[in-house]
Image (spheres, rainbow, N blue to C red):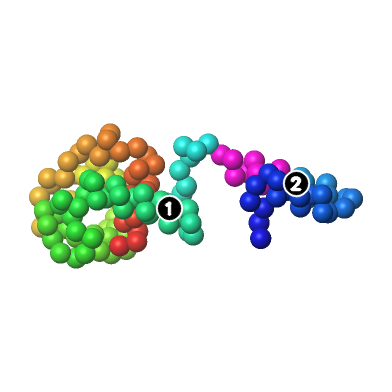
Amino acid sequence: MPPTGKKDVMRRIRSVSGRHRVVFAALSVTLALACAGDAADAPDVRATGELGLAAAQRGESIYNSNCNACHSTGSDTRVGPGHAGVFQRAAGRTGLSAEEYLRQSIIDPSAFVVDGFAPVMPATFGSSLTDREIDDLIAYLRTL
């Protein structure tokens, strides 16, 4: 079980003797420093596990507040296309990666307009959403 706090780390250090104690302490400090990044640092949207899940959960909230009036999470059409499988479809639409394509589509919706749809998506999301919120939104779209 990984250490859960400073007391747990110190208890584990005391339980290790001699040279191993120094190595363990150095590794513990390195790990603590690596994990203590700025809270504003957003995890990469390609992250898996809990970080990716947390980003996708935040992204779902952003989606519900900003996107679902015009887009569905299924394949049905509203004002814009449904988003079921959008990450997979985005990967093959241009020379961009799926993430880059979706980011560009959010920031500059007129850059890529899906055939059969009018270019009516508001061009305000690039300024109204933070980079982290866009990352989280893309993480959520990846799950659809």
Which corner quadrant holds the C terminus? bottom left
> At x 47% / y 47%, what residue is drawn?
43
Which corner quadrant holds the N terminus? bottom right
Find residue 143 and report its horizontal and vertical position in percent. 34, 61
Residue 100 seen in this snapshot? no
Q: Which mark is residue 41?
A: none
Q: Considering depth in this image, is 89 or 8 the residue closer to the camera?
A: 8
Question: Is 112 left or right of 116, judged from the image as shown?
Answer: right
**Residue type (three-letter) at the residue carrying disc 1:** Ala
Residues tagged 1 and 2 counted as in contact (Cβ below 8 A): no
Per the rendered image, the range of residues in magenta is: 28-37
Q: Is residue 7 above or below residue 86?
A: above
Question: Is 38 left or right of 65, judged from the image as shown?
Answer: right
**Residue type (three-letter) at the residue carrying disc 2:** Met
Within the magenta stretch, is there residue 30? yes
Q: Residues within 10 Å of mark 1 (few under 14, many from 20)?
A: some
> At x 59% / y 40%, what residue is drawn?
36
Tell me which label, 1 or 2, sits earlier in the chain.
Answer: 2
Number of marks drawn: 2
> At x 44% / y 55%, what residue is drawn?
52
Which residue position is annotated with label 1? 54
Which residue position is annotated with label 2? 10
Q: Name the dominant secondary structure of the magenta segment.
A: helix
Label 1 SS: helix
Q: Is residue 131 above or below residue 16?
A: above
Q: Is residue 120 above or below residue 97?
A: above
Measure the C-alpha gap from mark 1 to mark 2: 29 Å
